[in-house]
Image (tube, coloured by chain):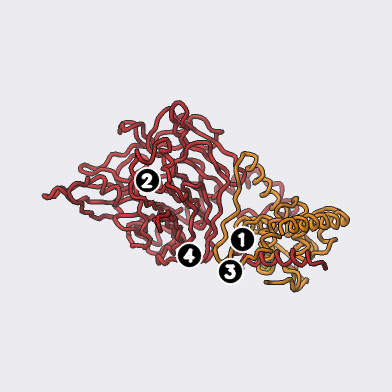
Amino acid sequence: MSTLEDRVRAAFWADAETVRPETIRGVPQRPARPGRRPRARGAGRTSRTARWLAPVAAVIAVIGVIVGVHLAAPPVAPSSVGALTGLPPYYVTLTGAMSSHRPVLTAAVHDSETGALLTSVNVPVRQKVPQPLHHASHSSAQLGAPPPMPSGISASANGRTFAITDDVGFFLLRVAADGRSAQLSRLPIRASYVLSDSAALSPDGNQLAIDVESCKRVCRQGIEVVSLATGASKLWLGPSMAGPPLSPAWVGSGAEIMFQWQVGSSSALEGYRLLDISGAGGSLLGSSRAMVSPQAQSGWQFAGPMLLTPDGHGLLTTEYRNVPGQDGGGTAMLRVVELSASTGQLLRVLHAATEHYGAGWAAHVTADAACQVLSLGPTGVHALIRCPGLGRLDGDRFTPLPGVPVIMNGGTGIGGAVAW
Amino acid sequence: MARATGRPDAPADRSVPAPTLSDADDLVRDLYQAHALALVRAAKLLLRDQPSAEDVVQDAFLGLYQALPRLSDHDQILPYLRVAVINRSRSLLRARRRALLRKVQHAPPMSSAESAAMAGEDRRAVMAAVARLPRRAREVLVLRYYLDLTDQEIATTLQISRSTVTSTASRGLAVIARELKEES
């Protein structure tokens, strides 16, 4: 054997050895429909009676099971689920910091149950002064220095694949089955639009919904959905406007995307819409329908964004009530609430907290910074919130978690986010 | 540095039990435990990306559930998996090429500092030269020098003639030698 063949072999083996057995995923589960099985003789033709009897029997069986379950045990509201059923295995925090005058962005993988830090990965960021992407036409001086480091994170339904967005681009973070290692790869996506820091990974992990802004004569905001496998993309653009990020979020199985809609500062035109992504792209408003516009309870005001539960029935959000103090400051009473997605009515209060603020601060700024629903698990029972500290909400039970993701809306040089 | 001591995906026992629907789960699990690592490593050599390599191997094993009833000869299972991994890797590389056509740069995943430190200069130079080879040459070299397949087995896996395997490997090695000489 030649020396060259030895070198090639050695290089292959050394490179292959970087794949450690403990990092690869386990045996894939048998698909629900394992493929066509050989038909038994005569099974291909069923009588007309048998054809309609089968679904009827199935319905009766399901009804029987439901009745049986109700008789056997009292109804259990999702809020009082005791076990951590459906808890995503990991949550990932994305925190930015300045180290020796250089920005550092770290994705940290935590155990969802205990909060233990399992592993962390540095995410590449621009080493020069970063421009906030959704206002890239403005100079950093106009926005105040130092500018924030734009970053965002979202998760697929499998709980181990995360999409990260920052000022360099888009990245996919895949967490090993045991959570002890994670691999970051840059996604081959470069939209030709000015991007915001808001992107959402589809439940199946195959598509990314990106908040885009196209600025030619006028700026138009929209949502671009990119296939991670092929790079093919579809674009929906709204009318001329320059509002806040649309904050796209996938709904249910991934057929629709919920986004926040606001024209200028007119609250009458703000709200949430559902975009049907089955089409080829086009008009953002024409391809979407308005959702209910909930009204806050008397004396309360909504604070953070709203997230639709996977079953489409509930909206999770936060609201606050201002109690002014005598020193110019006051107290923001905060709560995480679930609203009906069909009527907008308050269904239940999931968590309550208070945050004091000093003179010169506004209650709504305090509330917005202190209390937000950050990420909703695939079952809708578990949510990551910050109110005021980071924690896990299992139904209506709050458990503090470490990670300190502080979402800053500008001016601090530190950005952060969390998802599961 | 680890050296080849045998075929990484060679079955320890060729007497694979008959794949019936009832024990397909057990069979796939045993096969996965025996061969998944080597297949992921081989796919990673082709794709330069472990998550994608894992996806490819997972897909191949998922496909195995459907293919098992057709694989009457037990010795066909491992070759089937190799072909499945190669084909899925090709599909993924095609998708990446489509992405490149959109003037989008695919960047390989960042290695950890630890693994980067472990990677010797020579290995990196060789791997870089391999990465620049045409797809078929890369496949031939990976199957030959990582999976230790014979030229006939490579020909069967890639569905090309044995002489094509030999000539492709020779040309690939010649290109690597030239590139390494130019670098040094």
Chain identifier for the orange-coloured part of the image: B
Chain identifier for the red-coloured part of the image: A
Task: State which chain disc 2 sits on.
Answer: A
- If the image is split into quadrants, where does the N terminus of chain B sit? bottom right
Residue found 30% across the figure and 33% down from its top: A267
Which corner quadrant of the image does residue A103 belong to? Answer: bottom left
Label 3: how many Cα within 10 Å (few below 14, some 14–19, many 20+): few
The earlier-in-sequence mark between 1 and 2 is 1
The earlier-in-sequence mark between 4 and 1 is 1
Residue found 51% across the figure and 49% down from its top: A203
Task: Select label 3 or label 2 by which is in front.
Answer: 2
Element marked by disc 2: loop
Distance from the alpha carbon under mark 1 to that under mark 2:
45 Å
For disc 3, the marked residue is A22
Query: Relative to the observer, which residue lies in front, B58 or A246?
Result: A246
The earlier-in-sequence mark between 3 and 2 is 3
Q: What residue type is labelled 3?
A: Glu
Taking A143 as reference, is B168 left or right? Answer: right
Task: Select label 4 or label 3 by which is in front.
Answer: 4
The earlier-in-sequence mark between 4 and 2 is 4
For disc 4, the marked residue is A119
Task: State which chain disc 1 sits on.
Answer: A
Query: Relative to the observer, which residue lies in front, B103 or A3?
Result: A3
Distance from the alpha carbon under mark 3 to that under mark 2:
41 Å
Residue B97 rendering spot, x and y as whole percentages: 67, 44
Mark 4 and mark 3 on one chain: yes
The earlier-in-sequence mark between 3 and 1 is 3
